[in-house]
Amino acid sequence: MMKTDELRESYLAFFQSKGCVRKPSDVLVPRDDPTVLFTPAGMNQFKAQFLGVGKLEFTRATTCQMCLRTGDIQNVGVTAYHHTFFEMLGNFSFGDYFKTEAIHWAWEYLTDKKWLGLPPDRLSATVYLEDDEAYDIWTKKIGLPADRVRREDENENFWPAGAPSNGPDGVCGPCSEIYYQAPGSPKSVEIWNLVFTQFNRVGSPPNNLRPLPKKNIDTGMWLERTASVLQGVPSNFEIDILKPLCLAAADAVGIKYDFASVNGRPIRRIADHVRAITFCIHEGVSPGSEKESYVVRQLLRRALLEGYLLGRHEPFLHKLVPAVVRAMQAAYPEIAETQKSVAEVIEQEEGQFLGVVDKGLSKFEKCVEKARSAGSGKISGDDAFDLHQTDGFLIELTEAMAAQKNLAVDIERFKYLMNQHKIGSGSGAFLDSVMAEGPLDAVRKSAGATEFLGYEAVEAEGEVVGIIAEKQLVDQLEELSHAAPVAIVLDRTPFYGEAGGQVGDTGTLTADGCRFDVIDTQRDGSLILHIGHLQKGRLQVGQRLKATVDVERRGAIRRAHSATHLLHHALRKTLGETATQRGSKVEKDHFRFDFAHKRALTHEEILAVEDEINARIAEGAPVATRILRLEEAKKLGAMALFGEKYPDPVRVVSMGQFSIELCGGTHLSNTGQVGFCKIVSEESVATGVRRVVAMTGPRALQRIRDTENLLKELMGHLKTTQPEDLPRRITALQEELRDVKKQLEAQTSESVAEVAEELFAKAEEVGGVKIIAQTTDVTNRDTLREFIDRLRGKGRSVAIVLGSATDGKVALTAAVSKDLVQRGISASDCVRTAAKIVGGGGGGRPDLAEAGGKHPEKLAEAIAEGAKFYRLKLGA
């Protein structure tokens, strides 16, 4: 039986034998592709090669790509083959081999006993209904019987699906799929998909498919699906790398795993989701509220919810990270390096979500009460959506708990509302736009890459190869100080384009009678874009310009960037090896640095980190750079930012004997040139991720001077000549303020008691209940609540609605005594009724509620409406 790791290696070795260059998996979370949140397919990293832009260093490639898709998330664990995270084996041709080779090699690999040796009579194929070429290869050259080659329409066997009729415009082509039917199984499973990108779609039918001058191949074989075929198991989740993960999930939840049991589905979903989130968090994407982070949070919470509904009400997902590492580290050994920090992030998020569930239970009960009061057998879709979106109370939990109370959920309305706020995995956007060629692609085709000279120079000559204004490629630019910035592309430049956390350079591009001010420099793949405004003369493609970097700013950035490496070293030395970098932003003598750590640093730890940084600065250690093959650099122990995409070869930056990292930024020649580094803050930025903000060089020195000036100012205000006297003077002032506050509170309490008794005596009475409806000047919350407590004290039956207006805003408070709550009279309903008059809203508990509004001129009317509400409820 071939194991999954053996299958992965076998496939890559086979296509290497066919001349394909083996490339590593691209990152799971692409940082430089705005069309996707996660890598959805193996061809994602080869966009430039498919479009024919830039220098083509190879024409054949093979990969095993980590992928993540959430479009079919509801099917995960239900069907035999759906996953969120999965691996796609691929082979690719860029104007090299085409249909004949692609089909023959697929057949050879699948059926030759040297490779997989699958029985040919258990394989079948599909082709696009108009693709006679592929059909003939299968039937006449491979020898598949005609009844095992099925023709399908463009919605089934074309990429993108339905492209000829419905678009999008761009590169596209027919597909051919390979299916395997296991002995005794009535169904065939698709294990291989060949995409023949041979057309450029332009406009609507007919005659809208234009043949490409160079035809490409994009092939994908599902690793997990093929492993299940080879291992003779009924599902991907039963293969050698995933079955142990399912067993570990069941053990963590406290039940026995049985594939066919009713608990099998939730356990498979837990196993799938924890594998996905482990890889995402490993790459620095922590659970959060936006984009990729939102998807990670939802996957984590869905997995935790499955365990919660099985009776596991404590955090358990973090305990599965070691099982994920054991299953996947043969192919991705780097995930073992972050095992501890990933588990800590997951555990923190689990605790937060279980807290959300506890808080949401009371709100859920109100939704139940509301449904029953309305005589409905359903919790409304709006309430379910509010619980899901506002409170993080997942819809699956609402449905499960509603069922326990013999209620349904208006799921159609919920789905409608969710679609309005839908955040997907981005795979659809990718399929629609990855092959759309823009102005920068045209520049790449004609001029290739920009040569970066900035490691050795801050001034150089370059030729204009592209001008982009208003998102269009233009031949020349004459308008001075154009409102929108313009991008200039040179064939060579000393300007550093923003990358790896380091901001882009600023400076000037000049020629006789011409000056262009560069306010930022960005990268787009292999191109460096000088962004700014034309201040003098005119620019045109082919023109020679002198590119001059702002040297002072570059020097300050170099100080800060080198200091981030010193900080990384100091953090790992002080906190441990798990304090790994999660991102950075390097600016002029200022930087922020994110790292994995589950708790705030103590004051002593911050001082220890700062001391270590400045000790290494004082050491004046040499900073050296080398260009090495990626594997060689890793063997040397070079630190890499997890989730960052590195070229091969890579640039390795070493500082003395204590730091070696992969880095493409600009640096100093020795650590002493940093001068001084001062940490100014440390805070949390995401679950399990902390951030240090620091300053270097003159800016750090100015920070110290600003602090000294502030100290002198405080000494003047507190009338002391010695800084060490300040704590004593501040303590004395605090004690004095406490005494004054106590005196004021005592006076206020007496006043509140008198006013409360006076209002109670004058209040309207309905059925033995005093209704107190009054405007008030009291705006302090504590005083207001004391006032209400006085009115409700001594067993009194009282219904209260009070209002005040300050700075054009209205504040309303309603309260009722406990006996009225038992009679079904709600302060929350009262305050909402009153708030409508002043154009606001609010709510709270049945006995005490608050609201706001924006029409102070209607305050008296709102108070009257609140009193009317109480009268009606009391039967008056």
Image (tube, helix red, strand yellow):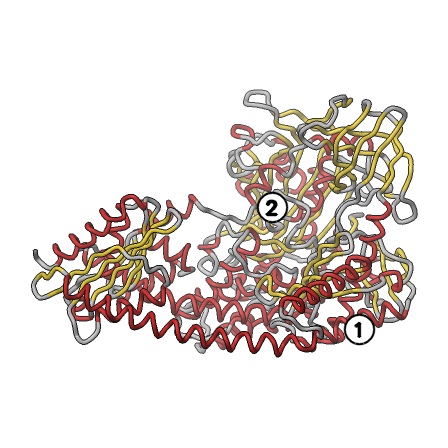
Q: Secondary structure at mark 1?
A: helix
Q: Which residue is mark 1?
A: 612
Secondary element at image label 2: loop
Q: What is the x, y in percent for residue 409?
A: 30, 55
Identify the residue at image location x=77%, y=52%.
Answer: 588
Q: Is residue 818 left or right of residue 398?
A: left
> Which mark is drawn over residue 623?
none
CA neighbours of label 1 inside 10 A, class few (<14), some (14 to 19), many (20+): some
Give coordinates of residue 239: x percent, y percent.
57, 66
Q: Amino acid at mark 1?
A: Glu
Residue 584's image quarter? bottom right
Residue 743 in view (yes/no): yes
Q: Nearer the viewer, residue 403 or 186?
A: 403
Q: Quadrant of residue 320?
A: bottom right
Which amino acid type corresponds to the residue marked 2 in the rendered image?
Answer: Val
Between 496 and 109, which is closer to the camera in this rendering? 496
Identify which residue, 712 or 374, lies in the foreground.
712
| Left or right of 674 in this view: 832 | left
Q: Which residue is mark 2?
A: 36
Total marks shown come to: 2
